[in-house]
Each structure stands twice: as C-alpha cells, then as structure tokens.
Amino acid sequence: MYCRNCGKEIDDKAVVCTGCGVPPRLEKKFCLNCGVATQVNQAMCTKCGVSLTGVAGSSGNKSKVAAALFAIFLGNLGIHKFYLGYKSEGIITLVISFCCIPLIVACGLGAIGLGVIKIITFIEGIIYLTKSDEEFNRIYIEGKKGWF
C-alpha cells in the first residue's frame, strides 16, 4: 500500500505514514494501490485502474452506531465483528458462543461463558458509541483494531 499523501510505500495496517505523519488514506495525491501521482478530482487511477473515490483495502464507511447496536444486541453471534470486516474475530466469538451451548445443557456452566461474552460485547458497543466518528474510523476501520 502507498500513502495517499506522500506516495511512500507503507504497511497495509499503518494508521499513520512514517514518511509524512498523515493517516495514509486521508489525502488523494497518490494512488493507494500503486503509488502513482493523481489529480484531486480524479476518480480512477490511470495506471492500475483502482477507484480513487473510495478507500481501497478498508471496510468502507461503516456506521459506529450500527456497529454498537450489533455489539450490544447481537454480540454473542459476533455480528458487529463481521460488520466491521473482522472475519477471524467474528468466527472466534461465534465459536465460543456455540461451544457454551452444550455446557448449558449439560451442567449450566455455559451460561457463565455466554454471560462473559455478552458483557464484553456490551462494553465494546459502549466504547464504539463514545468515540467520535473520526476516532472510530481511525481506530476500527483504518487501524483494523479487532478487539476493544
């Protein structure tokens, strides 16, 4: 991936460019995919054909309110993780939840596990809601922070 501000090649998960200190997806001076210089109003990279109107490699514009509501009400199913593009974290949450079901049937201990997961996802939902839109995008969309 290339910084859209200075064109320096950087890690795909970089939150800030090491070359210029700017979040790498904010500007539109360079193509995020190939690093070629672009014009401000350019919609597509003329070298590699990638769209310059959206953020390549990100989850797109995700609503922090939707993510928070998914976390609060459907957290045990990992829906908020899938919504934000965190497949591994979503699968982990889902598997843990389904592993607790036989424990509930067998001895009632699975309810504790489900309760713990519910508390964690409820806290995640509240954390999402307390972040500003910019901070939410920087941490969870651009930064790809999967847990808390």
Image (cartoon, grey):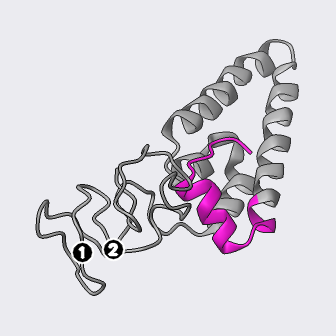
Taking the image as drawn, is residue 65 in sight? no
Residue 73 in magenta?
no
Three-letter amino acid code at the position of disc 1:
Thr
Q: Residue at x 70, y 47 (%)?
A: 75
* Circles 1, 2 touching at the beta carbon (< 8 Å): yes
User: Residue tagged by mark 1?
Assistant: 38
The residue range painted magenta reads 128-148
Taking the image as drawn, is residue 56 in sight? yes
Question: In which quarter of the view is residue 112 placed?
Answer: top right
Three-letter amino acid code at the position of disc 2:
Lys
Question: In which quarter of the view is residue 129 placed?
Answer: bottom right
Q: Disc 1 or 2, which lies upstream in sequence?
A: 2
Residue 20 image offset from top left, x and y in percent: 50, 61
Residue 29: image tag: 2
Q: Residues within 10 Å of mark 2 (few under 14, many from 20)?
A: many
Question: In which quarter of the view is residue 47 placed?
Answer: bottom left
Residue 48: image tag: none
* Vertical relation: 86 (above or below) 21: above
* Vertical relation: 26 (above or below) 104: below
Q: Residues within 10 Å of mark 1 (few under 14, many from 20)?
A: some
